[in-house]
Amino acid sequence: MAQTPMTGTLHERLGAAGAPLLDAVREHPFFAGLRDGSLPGGALLHFARQDADFLLPAYGRALARCAALAHDHDHALVLTRMAVGTLEARQAMALGYDLMAGELAADGDDSWRTRPADPATHAYTSFFGAASAGSLAEGVGALLPCSWFYLSVADDLRERHDPGGRYASWVSALHPGEDYREVLDGFLALVDDLGRSCSARELAGLERNFAIATRYEWSFVDAALRQLDWPIASMTS
């Protein structure tokens, strides 16, 4: 990721630095296949399983931990609302992939339902937990790309997808709606507040974790396309 420039608000500086990674995520073959309908159904089910059963719960809990670290009441409110919204979205996502499973699963293969967190998901969710156990700035830096990239990708999918394609209904369901834009604006305002108030050390931690999380965003999508699994079977007792 490009070095964070020194002009503008913190979220503007982070946005400029993270733009190349966001472009790479939007143009990833996974989302290209979702737009034109060529994505294998198994890849979408892998994505939905990893997102609903692992990523979103970990993200919601990390937001709640950050809310507990916030000294500003407005910041705590923003983070708490996001935590609740994320966990509610997780329930909707789980219902959605269950309804689509019959259409997307190849040859009745239901192995995706019980597949554990893949290596990329495990790493990303562990990063959420570790960052949110530190300082508020470190936690916010780690969590920001997931929300920010999500809305940008969802907007792009809605604008560029094939309305007659296989996944048109999924693209519509994936978009969080216009209310989410207001939620994200509140999160970005919180980020800017931290940029004005946190120490140089805290700011460096926020920027470092933001850079790491942007890479995890790409890795999560890439793992879904490849339906990544662990290279060896899990140990049994």
Image: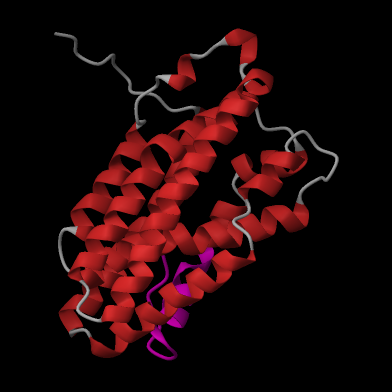
Relative to 121, say whether 203 is above or below. Answer: below
Residue ID at (37%, 71%): 78
* Magenta residue span: 1-20
Apparent side of residue 163 relative to residue 151 in the rendered image (left or right)? right
For residue 31, what is the image quadrant? top right
Residue ID at (75%, 35%): 37
The answer to which of 90 and 140 lies nearer the viewer is: 90
The answer to which of 29 and 143 lies nearer the viewer is: 143
The answer to which of 220 and 64 lies nearer the viewer is: 64
Colour convention: secondary structure
The quarter of the rendered structure image containing the C terminus is top left
Q: Is residue 6 magenta?
A: yes
For residue 141, what is the image quadrant? bottom left
For residue 202, what is the image quadrant? bottom left
User: Residue 127, percent across and down?
Assistant: 26, 50
User: Residue 20, percent across and down?
Assistant: 52, 64
Q: Is residue 5 magenta?
A: yes
Relative to 48, say whether 89 is above or below. Answer: below
